[in-house]
Amino acid sequence: MAVDTHWLADLERYAMRRPFLKEQSIWAVWAYRLGRRIDGRPDGIARKICLALYWPLFRFIETLVGISLPKSADIGPGLRIWHFGGIFLHPAVIIGANCTLRQGVTIGNRHEGGPVPIIGSNVEFGAYAQVFGDVRIGDNCRIGAMSVVLCDVPDGATAVGAPARIIFQHDNPAPAE
């Protein structure tokens, strides 16, 4: 089985020894990456058995830590979740590399069947930030705590408030660390 470079990048962002014992959020990230690996397997009985075992594991971890990362979501490498609980992503969401989520973040559509956000790389979400609908969050952005984002946020911008407004924007944003 090939090495999962996305999972290795996730672990690197946790930057601690034995993160499974110290941060419950990594359990949800691990379950998400496992689901993606299972989906990448060829059709057959082994895949069906893996999926049958995966779903109860996913639901157990989702319920235990309050983080829902559906395996159909497209999440880049280096995902970091600070604090666990109340994090929900729409199954069709796209998130770039090295993004950070804090507790209470919700990313999804505004109405059933509607379009979902596309999130760039190096985006940092404050606690309880919400992003809904057909919006694009650019690279190297910061979304403030308790903000409600309903429109596009350009690269390098900081958005705060409900509804969110741009309060700061770099001309040439540098990648967040």
Image (cartoon, rainbow, N blue to C red):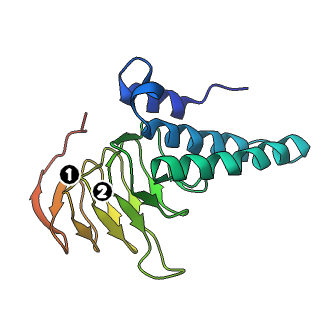
Marks 1/2 in contact by CB < 8 Å: the verdict is: yes
Across and down, in percent, residue 129 comes to: 27, 61
Which quadrant of the figure has residue 72? bottom right
Q: Residue at x 45, y 53 (%)?
A: 66
Which element carries disc 2, helix, strand or loop? loop
Q: Earlier in the sequence, mark 1 or mark 2?
A: 2
Q: Position of residue 127 (x, y in %)?
A: 25, 54
Above-or-below relation of 47 to 78: below
Dot 1 lies on which element? Answer: loop
Coordinates of residue 166 in the picture (x, y in percent): 13, 65
CA neighbours of label 2 inside 10 A, class few (<14), some (14 to 19), many (20+): many
Answer few, some or many: residues within 10 Å of disc 1's Cα (few below 14, many 20 plus, some between 14 and 19): many
- Can residue 84 be seen? yes
- Which amino acid lies under the numbered mark 2 shown in the image of this protein? Gly
Label 1 sits on what residue type? Answer: Gly
Please name whichever residue, 134 or 87, is drawn nearer the observer in this view of the structure.
87
On the image, the x and y values in percent for residue 36 come to 64, 45
- Compared with 98, 133 (above or below) is below
Decide which of 26, 43 is in the foreground and name it: 26
- Distance between the Cα atoms at labels 1 and 2? 7 Å
Residue at figure coordinates x 28%, y 69% from the top left: 152
Q: Nearer the viewer, residue 102 or 177?
A: 102
Circle 1 sits on which residue? 156
- Residue under label 2, please give it: 138
